Structure formats: structure tokens, C-alpha cells
Amino acid sequence: MAHWLLKSEPDTFGYPDLVKARREGWDGIRNYQARNFMREMRVGDQAIFYHSNTTPPGVAGVCKVVRRAEPDPSQFDPTSKYFDPKSTAENPIWDWVTVAPVRALRYVPLDELKTIPELSESRLLAKGNRLSVMPLSDLEFDAIVACATRG
């Protein structure tokens, strides 16, 4: 099983929204590297659900992949902000994976994540990294979950 980090803006779709929905397609990814990471995901892989573009940003929960990458339908919808006129049903460009909640975690803000030694080399903490989908090592994933489960 691989581990991932998925970023979402909580005012658009936060961890509580995933809990309420029970499963959801991770739509709107329009970065090739992030899309390629989603194409590597397998059913059962777990991800840290990270709230971005909020004050403070941080970890909110754990989710799991319940359906592998497939074409993101928002790319074909002209009314969607994620519409891509270059993408066609015959040659889709963008994918999504479907995720489901595993468990909510104590909210761990970014400043606290920066104090975890196992994350010192993590892409999450790298300067200028704005990637919304990224792999985590087992050590990074376990360290985040351990931090969030310590009161």
C-alpha cells in the first residue's frame, strides 16, 4: 500500500464534506505531475487529507482510494470551472480517483508539521511546493498520523 497527501481548500471541500458524502471523486486536478501521481494510486492506498489555502493550513484526516484513476468528468463540462476544451471523451487529459474517509484526525497545523523530524525532507514542507497531490513515504505518513493522535 502506498501513501499520499491530498490537498483541498476546506471552504470548497473539506474533510467533513468527505465524511458526509462517504465517497467522492478528487476532481479539478489540472497539474500533470499531480495527475500522474493519481494514476499511480491503487485501491486501498491511504492519504492524508490536508486543508490548504486556509489559516492555518494543516492535516484534517485520513482517506483511502476506493476507485482507481479514471477520466475526471468536470473536464468535459463547459459550465465547470475545470472545463478543458482540449480534452475529449476519446482523448481525456485529466483524471480523478475516488476517495472515502477513514478517520478524522486532530487538526495539525502546518507550523506543527514543521516540527516533526520525519518530515524534514518531505515535499509537503519544501519551499514553493504547491502540488495538491503528492506521495508520502510510509515514515512520513506514520509520523503525521502519530502526531495527530497524540493529544
Image (cartoon, rainbow, N blue to C red):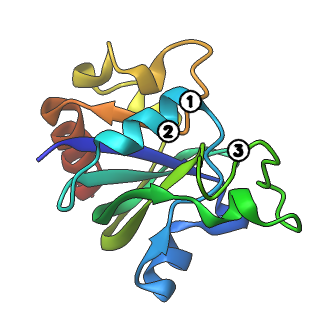
Q: Nearer the viewer, residue 15 or 111?
A: 15
Question: Relative to 18, is 122 on the left or the right?
Answer: left
Q: CA distance from mark 1 to mark 2?
A: 5 Å
Mark 2: amino acid: Arg
* Label 2 Cα neighbours within 10 Å, binned few <14 / some 14-19 / many ≥20: many
Q: Secondary structure at mark 3?
A: loop
Q: Nearer the viewer, mark 3 or mark 2?
A: 2
Q: Nearer the viewer, residue 62 or 120?
A: 62
Q: Secondary structure at mark 1?
A: helix
Mark 1: amino acid: Tyr
Q: Measured from the top left, where is residue 124 in percent x and y?
A: 44, 27
| Residue with the mark numbered 1 | 32
| Residue with the mark numbered 3 | 53
Q: What's the mark number on residue 35? A: 2
Looking at the image, tell me whether mark 3 or mark 1 is earlier in sequence order.
1
User: Vertical placement of 95 versus 116: above or below?
Assistant: below
